[in-house]
Image (tube, grey):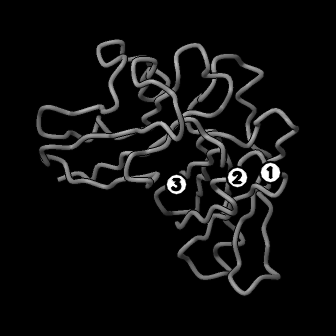
Amino acid sequence: MTFVGVSPFKSQNSNTQYQCHLSESDNIAEDAHVESFRTVWTRNDDNENVDPPVPVWNDGANYKHWNVKLNNNNKNDAFGVFGCEAALDGMINTSISGIFMRSDADIIPSDELVSVTVNAGDTGVSIGMKSTGSKNVAGFRWLKDNVRNGDISGQDTWSISRPVEVEDAGVYECHIQGQRSDAKQGLKLLIVRGS
């Protein structure tokens, strides 16, 4: 499956959407059971982490796909990490996710990429973030898959000091202390291929 984000760095806009393209032939893909989901919470309260709508099959495009239009509702509901899961009879379920951030984010990944793929056993893996303005690194707070890591508060890099394991895969988030609900934090997916 392939994930295509439309306006992924403008989540505050009304046209934020994503497409999930299955690698099966169109006639099989149309019969797939596809669901959309929010991968992790990226803000503090239940009502700030709205689930995406049901995917809609689009067979009128050059490339047939499932489409999910995120309704921003003027509340940053399109900010975060979203995905699709597809089920085809007799095949293994597969899922994929993508990131949507605001164009006026306070923090962004230091390499300006929203994902990195590594192999299990790789060393020297780190996730770096930087301020886009005058935000002080001392205020940086980190989470992985919505779980806080207080050990690296005030740092701009989450370093994995041992060989990377499949369990290290996930969503890494860095926000300014007390401002997580503003939806202006940096997000990055770490993808770890098994050995």
Compared across the picture, whether 93 is left or right of 193 comes to right
- Residue holding disc 2: 10
Task: Give the SS element for disc 1.
Answer: loop
Q: What residue sits 32% from the left and 40% below the top?
A: 127
Asked if residue 25 is positioned above or below residue 80 in the image, the reply reads: below
**Is 12 on the left-hand or right-hand side of 106?**
right
Residue at numbered disc 1: 13
Q: Which residue is drawn at 67% across and 56% down?
A: 34
The residue lying furthest to the front in this view is 134
Residue 134 vs residue 87, the one in the foreground: 134
Marks 1 and 3 sit apart, C-alpha to C-alpha, by 23 Å
| Pair 2/3: label in front | 2
Disc 1 from disc 2: Cα separation: 6 Å
Check if mark 1's residue and mark 3's residue have beta carbons within 8 Å.
Answer: no
Give yes or no for contact between labels 2 and 3 (Cβ–Cβ under 8 Å): no
Task: Look at 47% across and 32% down and name the residue there.
Answer: 173
Q: Mark 1 and 2 residues: CB-CB less than 8 Å, in contact? A: yes
Residue under circle 3? 96
Pick out the residue farthest to the bottom.
Answer: 62
The kind of residue tagged 2 is: Lys
Say what secondary structure mark 2 lies in: loop
The 10 Å Cα crowd at callout 3, few under 14, some 14 to 19, many 20 or more, is some
* Above/below status of 184 relative to 59: above
